[in-house]
């Protein structure tokens, strides 16, 4: 057993299955799961509602000034045993998973003022340790001292098929090509942006899960986690 609770950072490409693994690990260890993508999606929905994002264009200055009015919080839902995202007291968990939000989120996530605000919040959440946090810059920027870091990826086509079945299961009417295009464009914008681009931390354990089942991957990650917890 670990002498103390560790922090686990999980980064990687869009739809690489980070959140499923992070949730499962957090549940097993009795840790708190933080979905930082949900926070960027929450800001995006806020900007869309405020008409600061229109037709794929973000008014950066307007968003920066509006950030003082942004109140994003996670609340635990005992029925689903998951934390859900709230914007000013309203549950937005379903809305932030739409294709409309997915299409705009990378544009909003590259704005430095947005990142500063969310990164500060994420660091505060991890202060007490015992966190499994997933995103794009967790191991590199948010928690560079996390005791354990994973970097997850898979072929874009595999990720698009997985995402499509998830969206269809939620009754969303989208095509494979639309999803693949979104996965590729988010990869590109997330990796090429100037601030905190998606990249592997030097000390991250890389997992390409293109040919792994969820169970195989989970067993692998849990074993590594247990080993690491014994070392610290
Ligand atoms: O993990 P996700 O697909 O829900 O994330 C949505 C978007 O948010 C993703 O395209 C990039 C951005 N993001 C980010 O820039 N940094 C993070 N730590 C998490 C997500």
Image (spheres, rainbow, N blue to C red):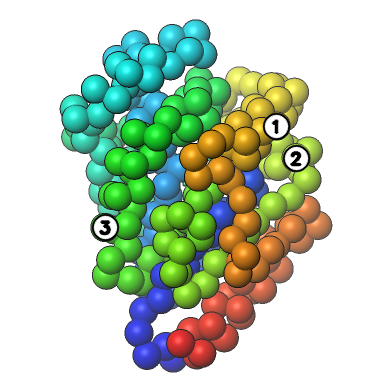
Give the mark, 3 or 1, whose residue is nearer the N terminus: 3
Q: Earlier in the sequence, mark 2 or mark 1?
A: 2
How far apart marks 3 and 2 lie (CA) works out to 33 Å
> In the image, what residue occupies the spot 35% across and 48% down?
119
Q: Residue at x 61, y 51 (%)?
A: 199
From the top left corner, tell me how far across and down residue 220 is, in percent.
66, 73
Against 98, is 225 above or below? below
Q: Is residue 206 found left or right of 231 in the rendered image?
A: right
Label 2, label 1: how many angstroms apart (C-alpha)?
A: 7 Å
Tell me the residue that label 2 is attached to: 156
- The quarter in which the N terminus is drawn is bottom left
Q: Which mark, residue 124?
A: 3
Distance from mark 3 CB to nearest ligand 1 atom below 8 Å: no
Select label 3 or label 2 by which is in front: 3
**Is 31 situated above or below 42?**
below
Whether the residues at callouts 3 and 1 have beta carbons within 8 Å, the answer is no
- Work out whether 192 lies above or below 131: above
Q: Can residue 218 be seen by looking at this rendering?
A: no
The residue identified by callout 1 is 184
Q: Residue 56 at what x, y percent from top left?
A: 51, 13
Residue 106: x %, y % from top left:
52, 30
Vertical comparison of 208 with 205: above or below = above
Q: For residue 66, which quarter of the picture? A: top left
């Amino acid at each position: 057993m670990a002498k103390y609770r560790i922090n686990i950072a999980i980064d990687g490409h869009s739809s690489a299955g980070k959140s499923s693994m992070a949730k499962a690990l957090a549940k097993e260890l009795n840790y708190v799961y933080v979905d930082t993508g949900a926070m960027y999606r929450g800001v995006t929905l806020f900007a869309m509602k405020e008409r600061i994002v229109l037709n794929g264009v973000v008014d950066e200055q307007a968003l920066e000034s509006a950030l003082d009015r942004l109140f994003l919080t996670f609340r635990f839902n005992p029925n689903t045993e998951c934390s859900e995202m709230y914007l000013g007291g309203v549950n937005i968990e379903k809305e932030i998973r739409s294709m409309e939000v997915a299409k705009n989120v990378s544009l909003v996530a590259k704005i430095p003022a947005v990142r500063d605000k969310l990164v500060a919040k994420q660091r505060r959440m991890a202060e007490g340790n015992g966190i499994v946090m997933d995103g794009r810059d967790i191991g590199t920027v948010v928690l560079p001292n996390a005791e354990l870091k994973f970097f997850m990826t898979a072929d874009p086509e595999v990720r698009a098929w997985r995402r499509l079945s998830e969206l269809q299961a939620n009754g969303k009417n989208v095509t494979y090509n639309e999803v693949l295009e979104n996965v590729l464009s988010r990869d590109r914008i997330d990796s090429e942006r100037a601030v905190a681009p998606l990249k592997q931390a030097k000390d991250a354990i890389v997992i390409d899960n293109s040919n792994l089942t969820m169970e195989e991957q989970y067993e692998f990650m849990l074993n590594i986690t247990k080993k690491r917890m014994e070392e610290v």
